[in-house]
Image: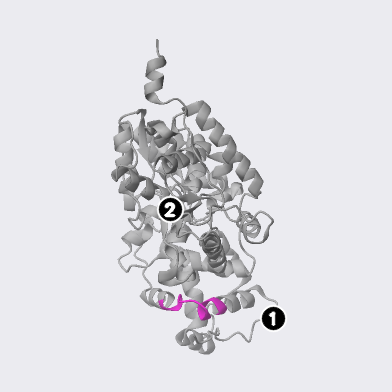
């Protein structure tokens, strides 16, 4: 692959931020396939603004900087000026042209982290420009000159270089203790036996939830373990890598590669075959989309989301659910990373329609859904909570309020955190739950799981 060199840098000093930015940009273009995408978008110069109407941030702010095509132009302008012959010639022979400055780069850093990278704008773009992809690329370049939210850096550094190798810094013994507590809770609260197998060599699947689930989502994990136990699945948790979170997807392909490769390495270590991702949208997409890219193409381990697995097991007769067991009104939030492409939309809905007495849809939904407002890693930046919940998440809050639902199923770790906060900040009378939290209540446990088998329980009833 040819090395890309930015044109006309002689007027920049060695230590200037613009020079470092352009050198990082050039290196990325030299070692990736972004150039054709940028070239096509740069030539189109589409500014019709149709994307504005699809963006939940712009719908609230009505600020020009929040129009997706305007934000993309920030990076495309640099590309045209410094990475095309036409741009270089214009700069050399005309006065008063565009020059990259520190202030301009800072403007980019601010603008690109106002975007949730939900890619809803792509649906309406008549030219097919993927503004979410351009946001991702811009963030990657910015990260190479150390302009990236601290929360993302700290979490990713712990996952790749820390002692625990996960974003929540949970030691493996603590994770195992949590699982033991959940086994006890399942017995006491639900009267069932569940299992969390550890380091089982030769299991079919290695389970990677968002590691934060071990701290914050016990019912989701109990529900997952319950369906896997009931269906006699061949699965395990690897104690050397048990975090499905991949913040590289939010800001750096270089780190995205390393995190995905670490998941594949854990599967290989345990002589397993399949990556099983928990209820997490970005963990699912990063593994599903990029495992083949970075881990062997067709030889990479296949990836399945737990909602897909549960649905298929239910349809195959390996699981039994009680119908209409959930009495409250329930709605479903589509995580962008698994719904925008149409990958996972119907499976959770079929389950919910069966186990819930009153299931209602948000409008729009599925591929046209609105982002929760915390996408693209912004949910991890607590300093911008008000922006996330009262601006980026306002449309989602209004959607949920309009359904009158008391429970909102958000099968994604980031979405759960964000939706819980936006419901609180927007004063919506609704609670967030995972899909498997509700499945846990609806599951008909087979006899081998019951602490007291049904027949015995009936016989002991006076």
Say whether residue 262 is magenta.
Answer: no
Position of the C terminus, as image quadrant, is top left
**Marker disc for residue 58:** 2
Q: Is residue 309 above or below residue 192?
A: below
Q: Secondary structure at mark 2?
A: helix
- The residue lying toward the viewer, choosing from 218 and 141, is 218
**Is residue 441 found left or right of 361 in the rendered image?**
right
Q: Position of residue 425 (x, y in %)?
A: 51, 37
- The residue lying toward the viewer, choosing from 433 and 124, is 433
Return the disc, 2 or 1, that comes first in the chain's sequence.
1
Does the residue at mark 2 contact the one at mark 1 (Cβ under 8 Å)? no
> Is residue 261 at least partly visible in the picture?
yes
Residue under numbered circle 1: 14
**Is residue 428 found left or right of 141 in the rendered image?**
left
Q: Residue at x 36, y 37 (%)?
A: 331
> Is residue 64 at least partly visible in the picture?
no
Q: Which residues are magenta?
A: 27-36
Q: Residue at x 65, y 56 (%)?
A: 158
Q: Position of residue 296 (x, y in %)?
A: 46, 71
Say whether residue 31 is magenta.
Answer: yes
């Amino acid at each position: 692959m040819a090395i890309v060199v930015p044109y006309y840098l002689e007027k920049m000093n060695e230590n200037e931020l613009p020079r470092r930015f352009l050198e990082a940009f050039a290196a990325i273009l030299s070692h990736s396939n972004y150039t054709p995408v940028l070239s096509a978008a740069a030539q189109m110069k589409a500014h019709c603004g149709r994307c504005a109407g699809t963006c939940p941030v712009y719908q609230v702010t009505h600020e020009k900087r929040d129009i997706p095509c305007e934000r993309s132009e920030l990076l495309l302008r640099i590309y045209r000026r410094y990475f095309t012959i036409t741009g270089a010639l214009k700069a050399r022979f005309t006065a008063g042209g565009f020059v990259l400055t520190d202030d301009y780069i800072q403007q980019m850093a601010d603008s690109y982290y106002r975007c949730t990278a939900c890619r809803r704008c792509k649906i309406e773009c008549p030219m097919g420009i993927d503004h979410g992809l351009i946001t991702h690329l811009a963030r990657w370049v910015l990260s190479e000159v150390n302009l990236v939210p601290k929360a993302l850096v700290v979490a990713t550094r712990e996952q790749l270089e820390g002692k625990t190798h996960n974003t929540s810094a949970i030691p493996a013994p603590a994770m195992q203790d949590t699982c033991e507590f959940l086994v006890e809770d399942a017995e006491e609260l639900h009267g069932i036996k569940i299992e969390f197998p550890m380091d089982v060599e030769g299991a079919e699947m290695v389970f990677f939830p968002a590691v934060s689930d071990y701290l914050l989502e016990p019912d989701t994990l109990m529900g997952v373990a319950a369906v896997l136990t009931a269906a006699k699945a061949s699965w395990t948790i690897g104690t050397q890598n048990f975090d499905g979170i991949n913040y590289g997807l939010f800001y750096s392909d270089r780190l995205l590669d390393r995190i995905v490769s670490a998941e594949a390495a854990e599967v290989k270590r345990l002589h397993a075959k399949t990556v099983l991702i928990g209820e997490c949208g970005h963990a699912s997409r990063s593994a599903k989309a990029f495992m083949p890219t970075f881990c062997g193409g067709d030889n990479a381990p296949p990836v399945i989301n737990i909602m897909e697995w549960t649905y298929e097991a239910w349809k195959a007769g390996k699981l039994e659910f009680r119908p209409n067991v959930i009495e409250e009104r329930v709605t479903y939030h589509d995580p962008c990373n698994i719904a925008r492409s149409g990958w996972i939309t119907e499976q959770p809905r079929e389950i919910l329609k069966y186990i819930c007495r009153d299931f209602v849809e948000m409008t729009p939904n599925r591929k046209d859904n609105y982002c929760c407002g915390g996408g693209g890693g912004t949910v991890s930046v607590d300093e911008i909570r008000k922006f996330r919940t009262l601006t980026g998440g306002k449309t989602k809050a209004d959607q949920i309020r309009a359904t009158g639902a008391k429970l909102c199923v958000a099968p994604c770790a980031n979405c759960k955190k964000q939706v819980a906060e936006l419901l609180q900040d927007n004063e919506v009378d609704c609670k967030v739950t995972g899909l498997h939290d509700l499945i846990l209540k609806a599951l008909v446990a087979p006899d081998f799981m019951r602490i007291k088998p049904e027949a015995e329980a009936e016989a002991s009833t006076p």
